Image: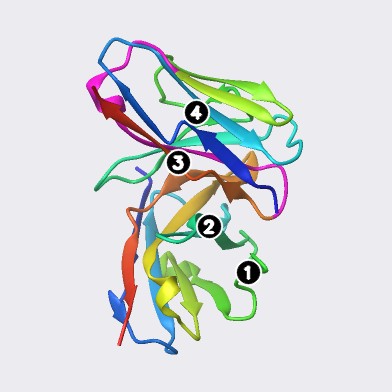
C-alpha cells in the first residue's frame, strides 16, 4: 500500500528556514520521482520542484534561489528545505509521487503539513 | 508559465445529478491535463490524466474531455462522496501549473 506522510514544524518565524520530511512506504524512491507542492491562500496550488529517481533535482524558478530538495533512500525519506521564509509562505506543503508515465502527474499524495510563518 | 482558469468557482448539485467543470489553459497544452479531487483530511486524489485517461481505481462516472486549451471534467450520477474540491493541472510543460479550484457542494 502506497503511503506518504509529511512532518513539519507547524510554526516558523519570518526569515527562518523551513524543514519538512516526507516519509514514504509501499514503493522505492529509486524508482519514482518525488515532488513538493504547496497550497497557500494567496496563490493556491504551486508546484515547487522534484527529485528524480536518480537523485538529481528540478525546481520551480519561483523558489529556486531558496529551495532545496534531498532524500535519504535508506530511510525512505524526502526532505524539503526552504530559507528566508515570509508570511506569504504560510500554507500546506504536500509531498507527492510522480507517475511513471509522466513525471509532472502526481499519482499519490501525502495529507500535507500545515505551516504558519509568523513571529 | 501557463495560466489555468477553472469555472465555475462554486457548483451546487444533488446526488444522482451530472455536473461539468471547465478548465481553460492560456496556451495550447495538447492533451496534457490532469484532474485531482481534494477533500478535508484526505490525500489529494488523481482522477484523470492526459485529458481523458481514467486513473486506475477511479469510478467510470468520472470522465474528461478536451484538447488544446479547453477541457472538461464530467461527473455523472453524483455520489455523496464526490462532493469536495476539484483542481485541473497542466502537465505539458515546465512548470506544471494548477487551476484555482472548483468547489462542488451539496444542494
Which residue is rendered at x = 44% and y = 58% of the image? Answer: A95
- Residue receiving disc 1: A62
- Residue receiving disc 2: A46
Which residue is rendered at x = 68% and y = 69% of the image? Answer: A61
Which residue is rendered at x = 60% and y = 72% of the image? Answer: A63
Instruction: State the image quarter where residue A6 is shown.
Output: bottom left
User: Marks 1 and 2: in contact by CB < 8 Å?
Assistant: yes
Quadrant of the frame with the C terminus of chain B: top left
Is residue A28 among what the camera can see?
A: no
Q: Please determine whether, in this image, residue B65 is positioned above or below residue A7.
A: above
Q: Secondary structure at mark 4?
A: loop
Q: Please determine whether, in this image, residue A51 is positioned above or below residue B23.
A: below
Q: In the drawing, does residue B92 fall left or right of residue A21?
A: right
State the mark number for residue B55.
Answer: 4
Dot in front, 3 or 2: 3
User: Marks 1 and 4: in contact by CB < 8 Å?
Assistant: no
| Alpha-carbon span between mark 4 and mark 3 | 19 Å
Label 4 CA crowd tier, 10 Å (few <14, some 14–19, many 20+): some
Is residue B66 among what the camera can see?
A: yes
Tell if the residue under mark 4 belongs to the same chain as the one under mark 2.
no
Instruction: State the image quarter where residue A102 is shown.
Output: top right
B79 part of magenta stretch: yes
User: Marks 1 and 3: in contact by CB < 8 Å?
Assistant: no
Start-end of magenta stretch: B75-94
Q: Closest to the observer: B55 or A93?
A: A93
Q: In the drawing, does residue B15 fall left or right of residue A105?
A: left
Q: Position of residue B87 (x, y in %)?
A: 47, 39
- Residue receiving disc 3: B101
Amino acid at each position: 500500500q502506497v503511503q506518504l506522510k509529511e512532518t513539519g514544524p507547524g510554526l516558523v518565524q519570518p526569515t527562518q528556514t523551513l524543514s519538512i520530511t516526507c516519509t514514504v512506504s509501499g514503493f522505492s524512491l529509486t524508482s519514482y520521482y518525488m515532488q513538493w507542492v504547496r497550497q497557500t491562500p494567496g496563490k493556491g496550488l504551486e508546484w515547487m520542484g522534484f527529485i528524480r529517481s536518480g537523485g538529481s533535482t528540478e525546481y520551480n524558478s519561483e523558489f529556486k534561489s531558496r529551495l532545496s530538495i534531498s532524500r535519504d533512500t535508506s530511510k525512505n525519506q524526502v526532505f524539503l528545505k526552504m530559507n528566508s521564509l515570509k508570511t506569504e509562505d504560510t500554507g500546506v506543503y504536500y509531498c507527492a509521487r510522480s507517475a511513471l508515465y509522466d513525471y509532472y502527474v502526481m499519482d499519490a499524495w501525502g495529507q500535507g503539513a500545515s505551516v504558519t510563518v509568523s513571529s | 508559465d501557463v495560466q489555468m482558469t477553472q469555472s465555475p468557482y462554486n457548483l451546487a448539485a444533488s446526488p444522482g445529478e451530472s455536473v461539468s467543470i471547465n478548465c481553460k489553459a492560456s496556451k495550447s497544452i495538447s492533451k496534457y491535463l490532469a484532474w485531482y479531487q481534494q477533500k478535508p483530511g484526505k490525500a489529494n486524489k488523481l482522477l484523470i490524466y492526459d485529458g481523458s485517461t481514467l486513473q486506475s481505481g477511479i469510478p467510470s462516472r468520472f470522465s474528461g474531455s478536451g484538447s488544446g486549451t479547453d477541457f472538461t471534467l464530467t461527473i455523472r450520477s453524483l455520489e455523496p462522496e464526490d462532493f469536495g474540491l476539484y483542481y485541473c493541472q497542466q502537465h505539458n510543460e515546465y512548470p506544471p501549473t494548477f487551476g484555482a479550484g472548483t468547489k462542488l457542494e451539496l444542494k
